[in-house]
Amino acid sequence: MTETGLSGDPKRITSLLEQIASMSETPAPSGVTRLAYTPLEREAHAVFAGWMTALGLSVRTDEVGNTIAQRPGRKGGRAIGTGSHLDSVPRGGRFDGIAGVVAAAEVARLFVEQDLDHDHPLRFVAFAGEEGARFGQACIGSKAAGGMWTAEALGTVYDSDGVSIAAAMQALDFDPRQVEHAKWDRDDWAAFIELHVEQGEVLEAHVTSIGIVDLISGSTRFELTVDGRASHTGSTPMSLRADALCAAAELVLLCEEIAKDARHRGTRCTVGKLDVEPGSITTIPGQVRLAVDVRDVDSSRQRETANEVVSRGRDICLRRGVQLTTRLLSDASPVVLPAWIRDISSGVCKDLEVSYRVMYSGASHDSQMVGHVVPAGMIFVPSRAGLSHVPEEWSSSSDIALGIEVLTRSLRALDVQLTRLGR
Ligand code: GLV
Ligand code: MN
Ligand code: MN
């Protein structure tokens, strides 16, 4: 069938984004809160499944809550997929992940409404639990698809209320013991491309419409616990204190200093969470827990940074007479995305005369995880002022619509190329 235009429809995009954004624990001005493995996240998946069913596609939910819709291809064989995630960080934006799921829905609509042919099955995916905000562990659903979880491991990672990923899954009627069945089979998948908002300001600064991702940063996340001595703020002389928060303050600045020095330039190191005990204005802090997130596109530099924070952190704590303990939360390596998929999307941009640049991703993505079993690519669309994980996160529907056109054409080109190569 001949195509009548392969761009997403900006009005529909806005409306689909709004439908998902309305499912939030926090009201609109405070941003979107739809955390991993919560009933609200499942509601969003049900809405996506409804969109897919309305287009006549078959839809299934896998063992860990990833929703996967399929349109059969003329020849069958291995599938080509697209999609992203539907959960958010606390008080986050309405585009991170959602833009990629809405893009998948729009691609599906374009194929169905225009009755476009394709040889390979097309799959449209909403991954579960991508954000590391709740469990410290990013990409839970896509790591299962990548075959990177065991049932035991799901029982050892907890949120701040002490609920494990396994328990959170069970509360939603998923059986964590079945996690290994969610693994994607290499013989069943040919390629995957995820559209995502950039979450940085490179595209906007360079007045460029599309980013084509070559590298996705890795992350090492760990918790530092500083144990000092709690006591009365009035009666304890300054010389007799073991103030855990003063040591923690030095640790925060240490993270910044290490990431900014010449050896680590390009590394991002952040303390995004501090829990101070007992948290009273009249008690010297006795214990502080810090959550540290190290990101890098260079895997050795990523791990060296984490090790240096811990070793120099120990010296700080020794000098201050407090104790330091460390707990690894997660560790994911940077990933190089295959050049042949990038080349397909670059070719599409050239044909369309759309400006693009090849760039790395500072954030983690589901493609990083499914990339372990299926060749994956990523297309970025601009983010206003580069803001993300905040209520101000914004990408225009017309920019997303153009991204959808590049995505749709890339998927079609992949279909043709894979058929030509007999794959
Ligand atoms: C995912 O959004 C991340 O934190 O990189
Ligand atoms: Mn995301
Ligand atoms: Mn995110």
Image (cartoon, rainbow, N blue to C red):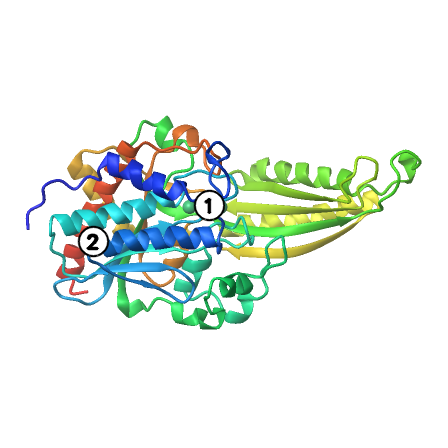
The percent coordinates of residue 292 (x first, y second) are: 61, 46
Q: Nearer the viewer, mark 2 or mark 1?
A: 2
In space, the residues marked 2 and 1 are separated at their CA atoms by: 26 Å
Give the side of residue 381 with respect to residue 1, left or right: right
**272 and 25: which is toward the camera:** 25
Sequence order check: which comes first, mark 2 or mark 1?
2
Q: Which mark is residue 55?
A: 2
Distance from mark 1 CB to nearest ligand 3 atom below 8 Å: yes
Residue 334 in view: no
Task: Label 2: state its secondary structure.
Answer: loop
Amino acid type indicated by mark 1: Ser
The percent coordinates of residue 61 (x first, y second) are: 35, 63
Residue located at (48% from left, 72% from top) = 177
Task: Label 1: state its secondary structure.
Answer: loop
Q: Is residue 303 above or below residue 204?
A: below
The residue pinned by badge 1 equals 88
